[in-house]
Amino acid sequence: MATLPVFSVHAGRETDVDVDRLTRDVLGGRDLTAESRGPATTIRGPEVHLDVDRGRGGVWAGDLSRLWDPSPTKIPGVGAVAEIATEAMERVHLIPELGRQFRLTKGEVRQATTVTERAGKRSTRKGESTFGRDVVVDISDRDDIVGDSIPMFGGGGRFRATVGEGGQVVGAHGVWRDADAVDERPLLTQAQALQRAGISTRRKDVKITGSTLGYYSAPAFSGQELMFPVYAVTADVLDGDRWVPSRVRLIPATDVGEIGVPEHETPPRAEAKDFTDLRHLVVPGQVLPSTLTVSTAVLERNGVRASDLLTRGPSGNVFVKPQLDLSLYPLIWEALRPRSFGASWIGEMGGLGGSQANAQGFVDEMTAEGWSRRFNWGNEAAWKSDWLSNDDNYVDDVDIVFYTGHASPDGWMLASGGSSDWLHSSDVGPWQGSPSDHWGQENLEWAIVAACGPLEDDAINGGGSVFSRWSGAFDGLHMLLGYAAVTYDNTEEGRRFASYARSGMTLKQAWFRTAQEIQPATNGYGDPYGPDVYAGAMYLGSASGSTGGDHLWGHGSVGPDIRGTSSTYRACHWSPC
């Protein structure tokens, strides 16, 4: 019988990352301040940010003025990028000394891509290049397991450096926790592992297609006591009469280990509560509380511009105009909304174990921000109508919505009548304003789809034009964030994304960083679902500005609402994981 070792994970690693050299010498940081809490340290400057947790083995650093910049850049060739990135990672000790049972892959270079469409014409430009190396478990001396190494899944055991304009390093991140083998456990078959995890192989709407043996290494800034063998289980899910790939699910491959938390029963669905009376918060000459927003769509329907009622101060605070005409008060009261969010998710209904906790992490962070939760519904309660026919009362009645579950280039899974029911690109129309009553017509600025799509495009893995599928979703929507490949089921995306957005990152930066820390670089799939894994952000631009640099309300600039035919271009930016 085949066996594999289970490793005990130490707190941190033997060689610390030289964070001072990383932030100052490599990234060129200035006016930096550091704050430490136990083994965790944050360093902040005007452009450079760094987070390191020596107790958990994670480090992330970037120059946010240059990292993930969609503007044209001059990047060295692949060989030069690998050399520059390797030298930088070695200089700051990002790559650790590994024990005899581990080794590093040779590494690969992957490049960011941005496509812009103006007047129906597409232009493609390449952006920064990322060189990455991964830790694998060396099994070359074993004869009971096929192969000479086993990969790691989960986000740990990875090291990346990103090279931008002129060959300058603009970002780096990695995580490793020293580990020692403490036990040898019999390897379960795929069937035995699925049974132990409580995953049925007899469902008509989900079919298991295979698995890959690996080790679970938790993402940066997450605790881990044991590193243990897992199967990365692949499956297909039914979308009408066709099968599409599922998120990859990790399950223990021996009798040791647990990933995530079991899905728990949720209360029955109830209608969202009406907003409380907010009229007393509108005071001429006073700052509008940061937890409130004003619906420009409501104002426009009444023939009023936001600038007629409100003004923005130098610090970004919004003030009610001092000499506000009394006749305008009812209009601003009608348009007033608390900052609000919603979440929809498909978990065990679709064969996924992490979705509920993934969405809950987003809910917890946004609640901590002081925003109002309008809904958080999963499985059979995650209604398709909330996104379409009744979106004015749900998805388009919030500022930001988070979805996690199943997706493809053409849409994502929701529910109707207790069964799965996919939202497709055809449901939102072929272009902006057709129909004119979808996302952003009332309120929604940002939508996140944490699944296996829907931003696939011929510019990267394939899948046609992302603009021909999803432009119709933008009826005031600022940004659609998602992936352009098959991704892995997890419990972390929602919490991390919201946390990084709350820290002052743009929403695109928060999403790209989250994806880097959670998702693998490759997934083993072909066109259009792989093999390279990309996070994506689709947004708009007009004479009034762009929505590509939006921040969460209260944490920086936000672009204009762009509706109908007022956009002069649409863009999608993809960054490799």
Image (cartoon, rainbow, N blue to C red):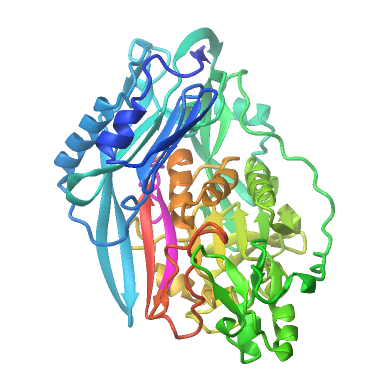
Q: Position of residue 406 (x, y in %)?
A: 57, 53
**Residue drawn where x is 42% and y is 24% of the image:** 176
Compared to residue 232, the image places residue 70 above or below, namely: below
Judge from the rendering whether residue 64 lies leftward or rightward of residue 279; answer left or right: left
Residue 483 visible to the viewer: no
Compared to residue 13, the image places residue 164 above or below, namely: below
Give the total number of marks visible in the rendering: 0
Is residue 471 on the magenta stretch?
no
Compared to residue 23, the image places residue 443 above or below, namely: below
Q: Nearer the viewer, residue 360 or 2?
A: 360
Judge from the rendering whether residue 74 lies leftward or rightward of residue 404; answer left or right: left
**Residue drawn where x is 26% and y is 65% of the image:** 124
Residue 375: name its quadrant.
bottom right
Report the magenta residues as a range: 521-540
Residue 303: name its quadrant.
bottom right
Is residue 539 on the magenta stretch?
yes
Q: Main secondary structure of the magenta part?
A: loop
**Residue drawn where x is 61% and y is 56% of the image:** 403
Q: Position of residue 391 (x, y in %)?
A: 68, 72
Residue 509 visible to the viewer: yes
Q: Position of residue 117 (x, y in %)?
A: 33, 74
Q: Nearer the viewer, residue 149 or 314?
A: 314
Q: Position of residue 64 (x, y in %)?
A: 37, 50
